Image (cartoon, rainbow, N blue to C red):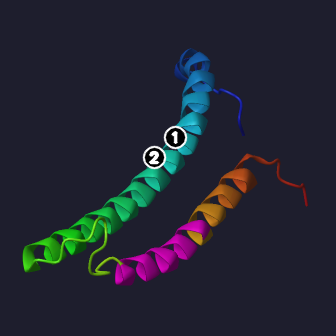
């Protein structure tokens, strides 16, 4: 079922290997970039709320260096929850990609 049957399929056949290789690398790059974006977004959000807490104390008039209201704490707990979900999703996606690459057993 995988062999070319007519002239057009024979002409397209040499393009299939490079397209397959590019597709396999695209899966890996896609997973890596999505995970990077998710982690970077969480860290940026936590950093911004930590800075807002420091600014809030300095506006009130309390001038202690690098101490502020802990506005970032709820987001840190949310980041732990979403980190668990991300680990689960990316592990499942990786496992699915491995299963798709492995040869199937004949029945």
Q: Which mark is residue 91?
A: none
Q: Residue at x 65, y 63 (%)?
A: 91
| Residue 100 vs residue 70, the one in the foreground | 70
In-front residue for pair 104/81? 81
Q: Are marks 2 and 1 in contact (CB under 8 Å)?
A: yes
Locate residue 54: give its quadrant.
bottom left
Quarter of the picture holding the N terminus:
top right
Check the image and report above or below for 28 versus 22: below
Give left or right: position of 54 versus 20.
left
Name the main secondary structure of what is drawn in magenta. Answer: helix
Q: Position of residue 6 (x, y in %)?
A: 59, 23
- Tell me which corner region of the image, top left, top right, bottom left or bottom right, holds residue 89: bottom right
Q: Which residues are magenta?
A: 73-87
| 29 w.r.t. 37: above or below | above
> Badge 2, how many Cα within 10 Å: few under 14, some, many 20+?
few
Q: Which residue is mark 1?
A: 29
Q: On the rendered structure, is 41 left or right of 99? A: left
**Residue 51: percent from left, percent from top:** 24, 65
Residue 27 inside the magenta-drawn segment: no
Residue hosting label 2? 33
Task: Name above or below for residue 102 compared with residue 59.
Answer: above
Residue 27 position within the rendered picture, expressed as x and y whole percent measured from the top left: 55, 44
Please give the name of the residue rendered at 71% of the width and 30% of the height, measured from the top-left corner: 3
Whole-angstrom CA distance, mark 2 to mark 1, is 6 Å
* Kind of element beneath mark 1: helix
Q: How many marks?
A: 2
């Amino acid at each position: 079922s995988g062999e070319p049957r007519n002239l057009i399929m024979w002409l397209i056949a040499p393009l299939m290997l490079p397209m397959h290789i590019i597709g396999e690398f695209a899966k890996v790059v896609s997973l890596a970039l999505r995970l990077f974006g998710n982690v970077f977004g969480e860290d940026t959000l936590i950093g911004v709320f930590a800075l807002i807490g420091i600014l809030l104390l300095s506006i009130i008039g309390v001038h202690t260096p690098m101490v502020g209201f802990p506005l970032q704490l709820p987001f840190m707990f949310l980041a732990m929850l979403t980190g668990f979900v991300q680990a689960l999703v990316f592990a499942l996606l990786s496992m699915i990609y491995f299963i798709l690459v492995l040869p199937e057993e004949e029945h």
